[in-house]
Amino acid sequence: MATQERVYTAADVWRLEVANENPLEKYYLIDGELYIKMAPSELHGETANLIAHYLTGFVLERGLGRVGVEVGYHPPGDRRTLLLPDVSFTSKARAAKCARRGYVPMMPDMAVEVVSPSQSLAQARRKAETYLRHGTALVWLIDPEAKSAEVWQRGTAQREVIDLDGELSGADILPGFSLPLKRLFSD
């Protein structure tokens, strides 16, 4: 749910976050609507951490690019959209010098969103559509409660649902990468 009815920009979000008295509160934008990204639950954090761990090992071993955690990205020329994927990947070919301040002025090649209890699946799907619309090629929506995932790819009309017995694939973005969901959701 949007927190305000005015149109916000990435610069507005930067000012809010710099002046923020609650460092756990972060913001994101979709078409100028401001949203609060709540502090993650332990399950959410653990799931994102495991995904980042597996992706980082694969990416670093092969020198493929960068894996980020809660990095802010906005599309070039669009300051009204700013997303903070739980985990992201940007290929070496596209990665510019690592930003030390501010948000990255491009979208990642791959974005991972872990659905949290404070977020509906519909909200997560809206984010997936926004990533794809602005140039991200692969989006994973991970639902720890349902122990499932949705895979969204640019250029395909349907999302793929992966159950606990399935595995996530890096597709064309990270060829050869696979992650069985059971590795994320062991009891």
Image (tube, rainbow, N blue to C red):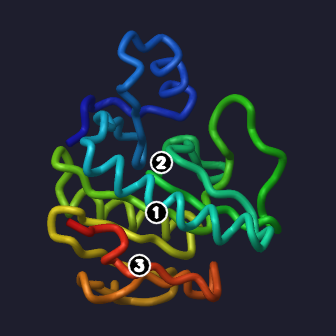
Secondary structure under badge 1? helix
Q: Residues within 10 Å of mark 3 (few under 14, many from 20)?
A: many
- Residue 51 is tagged as 1
Residue identified by numbered label 2: 83
- Residue 166 is tagged as none
CA distance separating discs 1 and 3: 16 Å
**Circles 2 and 1: CB atoms closer than 8 Å:** no
Secondary structure under badge 2? loop
**Front residue of 186 and 113:** 186
N-terminal label among 1 and 3: 1
Residue at 27% x, 32% y: name it.
Answer: 5
Q: Amino acid at mark 3?
A: Trp
Quadrant in the picture for the N terminus: top left
Looking at the picture, how far across and down is residue 23, in whole percent?
Answer: 41, 20
Q: Amino acid at mark 2?
A: Leu
- Is 38 placed above or below 61 here? above
CA distance separating discs 3 and 2: 16 Å
Quadrant in the picture for the C terminus: bottom left
Looking at the picture, how far across and down is residue 178, in whole percent?
Answer: 51, 83
CA distance separating discs 2 and 1: 18 Å
**Front residue of 120 and 82:** 120
Residue identified by numbered label 3: 152
Residue at 30% x, 75% y: name it.
Answer: 149
Residue at 27% x, 29% y: name it.
Answer: 4
- Is 176 placed above or below 182 here? below
Residue at 50% x, 44% y: name it.
Answer: 70
